[in-house]
Image (cartoon, rainbow, N blue to C red):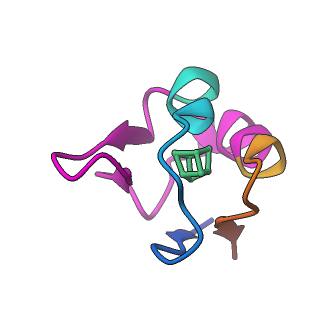
Amino acid sequence: MRITIDEDRCRGHGVCCTVSPEVFDIGDDGYAVTEQPDVPREFQQAARTAAMSCPERAISCH
Ligand code: SF4
């Protein structure tokens, strides 16, 4: 599974980082980043939950 973060939608709430800290982080600019766009199997469930929890619908799972 691969994830993308829509930088135009992200507002930096950090919900994704709380739900899935292994996949998401807040970058120096205050918006979400990921070090693992190709999400390892063990983190995929949490990453999907993070995507559904994002108030801005900024995260896509492919
Ligand atoms: S939850 Fe959504 S809006 Fe908030 S930091 Fe994560 S990607 Fe951005």
Q: Residue at x 70, y 68 (%)?
A: 61
Q: How far across and down, in percent of the image, does residue 19 sit?
A: 64, 25
User: Is 19 left or right of 35, judged from the image as shown?
Assistant: right
Q: How far across and down, in percent of the image, does residue 33 sit?
A: 35, 54
How many numbered discs, if any? 0
Q: Is residue 26 magenta?
A: yes
Q: Is residue 11 above or below residue 17?
A: below
Q: Is residue 22 above or below residue 37?
A: above
Which quadrant is home to the N terminus? Answer: bottom right
Magenta stretch bounds:
21-50
User: Is 43 left or right of 62, judged from the image as shown?
Assistant: left
Q: Residue at x 70, y 41 (%)?
A: 50
Q: Residue furthest left?
A: 28
Q: Residue furthest right?
A: 52
Which quadrant is home to the C terminus? Answer: bottom right
Q: Is residue 49 magenta?
A: yes
Q: Residue furthest top?
A: 18
Q: Nearer the viewer, residue 4 or 32?
A: 32
Q: Residue at x 24, y 46 (%)?
A: 27
Q: Nearer the viewer, residue 55 or 43?
A: 55
Q: How far across and down, in percent of the image, does residue 46 sit?
A: 69, 33
Q: Residue at x 50, y 31 (%)?
A: 17
Q: How far across and down, in percent of the image, does residue 8 sit?
A: 50, 78
